[in-house]
Image (tube, grey):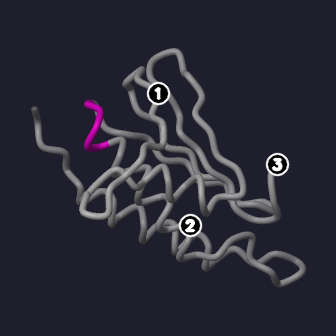
């Protein structure tokens, strides 16, 4: 198994913080807590890099909501799993499910896209 280059996770976190910092909605309210957005994005990217091969493509869109999509090239659909108190992994999708206003997985022609939205409740 090839080791994933996890440096990309930090780079994407920085770019997302920059995007959210530049975005100024008319009412002055951000669509999402930047730290929650960065945490959830980190979890999805890390999952894609550790559990698939071929890298990942990250897209973030800001309107009245923030939508982050992480596309990879594996067909296996991830699902939140039970974790133990002493376990060191397996909490990523549980965090996404708990903190995102909406989230899901969609199959692509090759691979899948795991996404979440923040800001104002379910779409």
Q: Is residue 71 magenta?
A: no
Residue closest to the far front: 85
- x and y percent of residue 31 in the render? 74, 70
Estimate the spatial distance between the alpha carbons at disc 2 and disc 1, rounded to whole Å: 22 Å
In the displayed structure, does residue 61 sit left or right of residue 77? right
Left or right: 105, with 78 as reference point: right
Q: Report the number of discs.
A: 3
For image coordinates 61% across by 73% down, the residue present is: 20
Is residue 52 part of the magenta span, yes or no?
yes
Q: Disc 1 marks which residue?
A: 77
Residue 35, which numbered label?
none
Give the number of the disc on residue 123. 3
Task: Indicate which disc, 2 or 1, sits on the residue closer to the N terminus.
Answer: 2
Looking at the picture, does residue 32 appear above or below residue 1?
Answer: below
Residue identifier under label 2: 37
Q: Residue at x 58, y 75 (%)?
A: 34
């Amino acid at each position: 198994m090839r080791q994933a280059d996890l440096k990309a996770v930090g780079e994407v976190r920085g770019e997302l913080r920059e995007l959210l910092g530049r975005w100024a909605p008319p009412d002055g309210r951000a669509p999402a807590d930047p730290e929650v957005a960065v945490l959830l994005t980190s979890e999805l990217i890390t999952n894609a890099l550790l559990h698939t091969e071929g890298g990942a493509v990250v897209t973030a869109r800001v309107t009245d909501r923030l939508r982050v999509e992480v596309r990879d090239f594996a067909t296996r659909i991830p699902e939140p799993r039970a974790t133990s108190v002493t376990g060191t992994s397996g909490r990523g999708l549980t965090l996404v499910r708990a903190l995102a206003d909406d989230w899901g997985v969609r199959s692509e022609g090759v691979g899948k896209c795991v996404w979440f939205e923040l800001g104002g409740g379910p779409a």
